[in-house]
Image (cartoon, rainbow, N blue to C red):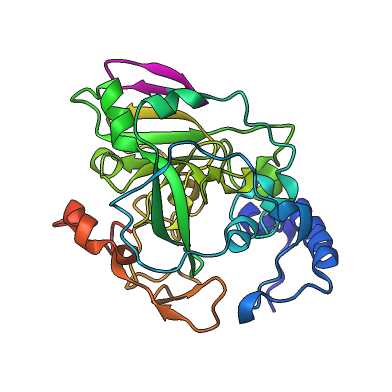
Amino acid sequence: MLIRTPNDIPYSEVTPRATWVRRREFIKLATGAVAGAGAGLLLPDGEALAQTGQKLPGVKPSPLSTTGEKVNPYKDITTYNNYYEFGTDKADPAQYSKNFQTNPWTLTIEGEVAKRKVLGYDDLFSMAPLEERVYRMRCVEAWSVVVPWAGISLADVLKQVEPTPKAKYVSFETVWDHKAMMGPREIGIPLPYVDGLRLDEAMHPLTILAVGLYGEKLPNQNGAPIRLVVPWKYGFKGVKSIVKIKLVEKEPPSTWNITNPREYGFYSNVNPQVDHPRWSQATERRLGEFLRRKTLPFNGYADQVASLYNGMDLRKFY
């Protein structure tokens, strides 16, 4: 029998204390709750489900809403989230992000650009039209949702800073609020969270900076006030609470790729033929549904984005 001592156990395999404490709290909260639509999900009720009540003015439907599927209820989208800075259980972000302050907010865009910009939240609305985009979103953990995002084209924003010829990639950095958020040792990943896209991915018409959902400002647990949405990639590319965008010459670091490169590649395109080491990616479960469905290449956006990867081995560059 193999006995592993604490020195033998990688830090990534240790359950953070805050995680099991919050799991116990969630179990108490969920006692007596009803599973959502046969999906086996216990979702909290009450204050965490309240919409922000802050309507976004001038939101127009986008012709790039490429799915005719029914959107998930607001409850699904706002109570079953990945946002590790507020906890590693899906119910944690809605419960523990209430004290996170998003006003005022500053977004810096710099690097290989001709016009470095430091923007306030409201400045974004003068840079591009605010549109509603209904997108499929797919998590690497084999669950999915359909979300009515409100946002602006990232390409329109980047064009205004005038990328130089050296700009090949776009990196993103999130806020790390020590007062409201958990720390690296509690959640097991380095902070602040960073990720990146190739420049042509960032400039693709489907890529947006989201500032709302269901016509209202983003709730904290969904990445308020500004988050990245790239619908053909797995959910960990949905960088939340962005404070810095930097155009760079070389491939930038990605938090999950740094933490566990065997499981999380830089590109993270939805590819049903490339399994996660611990589960299949061939099928997925839509929140609120019982039966599983086949996972679509590029999350159903292959017609729009597959040409970005012509000639690439998508098993190697996963």
- In-image side of 63 versus 109 (left or right): left
Name which residue lies at 43% across and 37% down: 58
The residue positioned farthest toward the bottom in the image shown: 291
Q: Is residue 123 visible?
A: yes
Q: Quadrant of residue 181?
A: top right
- Asked if the stretch drawn in magenta spans residue 118, the answer is yes
Q: Quadrant of residue 35?
A: bottom right
- In-image side of 143 versus 232 (left or right): right
- Asked if the stretch drawn in magenta spans residue 158, the answer is no
Span highlighted in magenta in the image? 109-121
Where is 279 relative to 291, above or below?
above
Name which residue lies at 47% across and 57% down: 147
Pinpoint residue 206: horizontal percent, then vertical percent: 30, 49
Name which residue lies at 46% across and 54% down: 148
Name which residue lies at 29% across and 23% down: 160
Residues 250 and 299: in front is: 299
